[in-house]
Image (cartoon, helix red, strand yellow):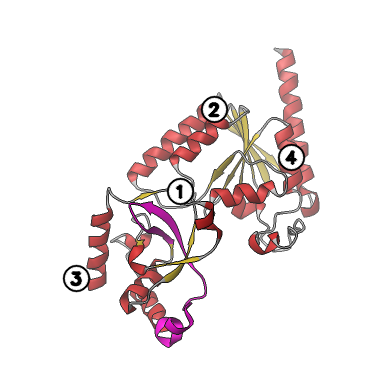
């Protein structure tokens, strides 16, 4: 087995130094508003990223390509790769990388500094506890922003974009009918929870839906991230809190509505069969039917 490169040794030592010291903290609105610059030395590698996993590790070929970008004039133009590194503010100092480890490595190798960064606030354990505590209903609806709510542009009709200049900041387009569907679900007594595997700030998502006059009760960002054993334990604990709060959950997907109930060990599937432009109406009809059936069962009891 080949020995570690100089950079891999540096990475391992940096991770050892940060362990138990570096913790995420909330960034202010001003810090999140625009891409800014930070010294390369102020950026911390993310121990949960594959880049830092000894079994996977950094891809030296990718790092080399970014090094060439810098040497071809990036240091002169001030933007060698065209987009900022996505980071999370940490205590006691600096930022933790969420996306851009190979670019960071190339910057370190060439002495390129500062680099452009975009600061986000990901959902933390305390955020989830606060969301649960603030919830008003004992039923909830969940949906995936990436797979469902944000229109993929593959022929699925979309809502009109927000007016200028909001459309320059909020570039995502909602699937046609999502605002009306979420309004309806709120009126039916459901809390709205949205999930995304991407690195959006929770404030960004909350504000975006507010422009469509939709209140989102729960926001889970970075849902697809690899977790440490400790973080898996935290996830299990928060899932228990969610289950203890809600007696019923409806998960809405493109092709079906999945219902799970706290007192039942099985789940129920309800296919959504409709043209794309009628999709939200079809989901509403399923929810209405479930509410009617629930009311009828209660009257029998």
Q: Secondary structure at mark 1?
A: loop
Q: Kindly identify the residue that appears in the image at 71 percent across and 41 percent down.
A: 182
> How far separated are the C-alphas under marks 2 and 1?
26 Å
Residue that mark 3 sits on: 3
Residue 12 seen in the current view? yes
Q: Earlier in the sequence, mark 3 or mark 4?
A: 3
Question: Which label number is shown at residue 183?
Answer: 4
Viewer-side label of 3, 1:
1
Whole-percent x, y for residue 230 in the image: 34, 42
Q: Earlier in the sequence, mark 2 or mark 4?
A: 4
Query: Do callouts 3 and 1 mark residues in contact (Cβ within 8 Å)?
Result: no
Residue that mark 1 sits on: 26
Q: Earlier in the sequence, mark 3 or mark 2?
A: 3
Q: Earlier in the sequence, mark 3 or mark 1?
A: 3
Whole-percent x, y for residue 113 in the image: 38, 74
Viewer-side label of 4, 1:
1
Q: Is residue 151 left or right of residue 243?
A: right
Decide which of 92, 6 is in the foreground and name it.
92
Residue that mark 2 sits on: 245
Viewer-side label of 3, 4:
4
Viewer-side label of 3, 2:
2
Query: Do callouts 3 and 2 mark residues in contact (Cβ within 8 Å)?
Result: no
Q: Secondary structure at mark 4?
A: helix
Q: Kindly identify the residue that appears in the image at 73 percent across and 31 percent down.
A: 188
Decide which of 244, 212 is in the foreground and name it.
212
> How far separated are the C-alphas under marks 3 and 1?
39 Å
Does 77 appear in magenta? yes
């Amino acid at each position: 087995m080949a020995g570690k490169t100089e950079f891999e040794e540096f990475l391992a030592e940096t991770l050892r130094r940060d362990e138990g010291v570096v913790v995420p903290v909330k960034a202010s609105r001003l810090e999140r508003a625009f891409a800014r610059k930070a010294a390369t030395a102020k950026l911390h590698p993310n121990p949960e990223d594959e880049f830092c996993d000894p079994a996977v590790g950094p891809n030296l070929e990718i790092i080399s390509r970014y090094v060439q970008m810098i040497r071809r004039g990036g240091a002169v133009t001030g933007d060698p790769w065209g987009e900022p590194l996505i980071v999370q503010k940490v205590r006691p100092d600096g930022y933790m990388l969420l996306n851009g480890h190979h670019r960071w490595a190339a910057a370190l190798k060439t002495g390129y500094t500062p680099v452009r960064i975009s600061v986000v606030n990901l959902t933390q354990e305390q955020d989830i506890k606060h969301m649960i505590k603030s919830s008003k209903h004992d039923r909830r609806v969940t949906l995936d922003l990436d797979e469902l709510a944000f229109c993929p542009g593959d022929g699925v009709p979309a809502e009109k974009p927000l007016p200028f200049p909001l459309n320059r900041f909020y570039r995502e387009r909602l699937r046609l009918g999502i605002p009306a569907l979420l309004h309806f679900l709120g009126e039916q007594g459901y809390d709205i929870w949205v999930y995304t595997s991407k690195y959006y700030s929770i404030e960004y998502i909350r504000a975006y839906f507010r422009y469509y006059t939709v209140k989102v009760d729960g926001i889970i960002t970075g849902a697809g991230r690899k977790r440490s054993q400790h973080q898996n334990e935290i996830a299990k604990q928060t899932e228990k809190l969610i289950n203890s709060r809600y007696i019923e959950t409806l998960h809405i997907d493109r092709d079906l509505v999945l219902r799970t109930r706290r007192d039942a060990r099985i789940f129920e599937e309800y296919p959504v069969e409709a043209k794309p432009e009628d999709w939200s109406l079809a989901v509403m009809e399923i929810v209405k039917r479930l509410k009617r059936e629930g009311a009828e069962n209660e009257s029998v009891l």
